[in-house]
Amino acid sequence: MTLDAIEFAENPEPRCPCVLLLDTSGSMGGEKIAALNAGLQTFRDDLLHDNLASKRVEVAIVAFDTMVRVEQEFATAEHFQSPTLTAQGLTYTAAGINKALDLLQARKRKYKDNGITYYRPWVFLITDGAPYGEDAYLLTQAAQRVKEEETNKRVAFFAVGVERNGDRFN
């Protein structure tokens, strides 16, 4: 038996894969990255306190700046490890989007291979600004891919912009 087969045998609940696509570029430094790190811990804690969500929601984290990194492979709340993110580099949003969508495709294949049903996957892009450093053509392609995935109901994509507003981030 593979590890996936064992995991799915122990928890045969339908799944909802969720990718947190996080901007870790230099402009996210200071209070923004600190708030993002705190938010990840709160998100994990909230998942753990919801019996159904803790069994069904699987979270992966993709961080992007000049590089794209999978900081957390798909995991249910009990196995979710909130990384400590740092801010650096440029904002390669298109590369991050493509990595997140590729991860979801691979995860859905694993579900199908193991007879696990799943809900429409979610991607939450959290960023403080516009892409910076990538070719405009790559951004156009990534945006088109998101549009096609949403139109065909293969993903629900949410973009969240954060900015400084008084004493808190919105």
Image: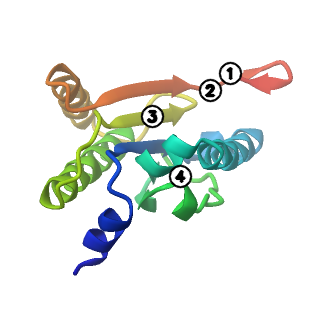
Residue wearing tag 2? 162
Judged from the image, the secondary structure of the residue bearing numbered disc 3 is: strand
> What's under tag 3, amino acid-wise?
Phe
Position of 40 with respect to 92 (left or right) is right
Mark 4 lies on a secondary structure that is loop
Residue 152 in picture, x, y percent from top left: 14, 24
Q: CA distance from mark 1 to mark 3?
A: 15 Å
Q: In the image, what residue type sits under mark 4?
A: Gly
Residue 160 to residue 74: above or below? above
Alpha carbon distance from label 1 to label 4: 23 Å
Give the alpha-carbon distance from disc 1 to disc 2, as whole Å: 5 Å
Q: Which mark is residue 170?
A: 1
Colour scheme? rainbow
Labelled disc at residue 89: 4
- Check the image and report above or below for 136 versus 133: above
- Locate residue 95 relative to residue 154 in the image: left or right: right
The reply to whether callout 1 and callout 2 are in contact (CB within 8 Å) is: yes
Q: Which residue carries the number 3 mark?
A: 124
Image coords of residue 170 (percent x, y): 68, 21
How many residues crowd mark 2 within 10 Å: few (<14), some (14–19), many (20+)? some
Tag nearer the camera, 1 or 4: 1
Residue at 30% of width from left, 66% of height from top?
A: 9
Q: Nearer the viewer, mark 2 or mark 3?
A: 3
Figure quadrant of residue 163 = top right
The secondary element bearing badge 1 is classed as loop
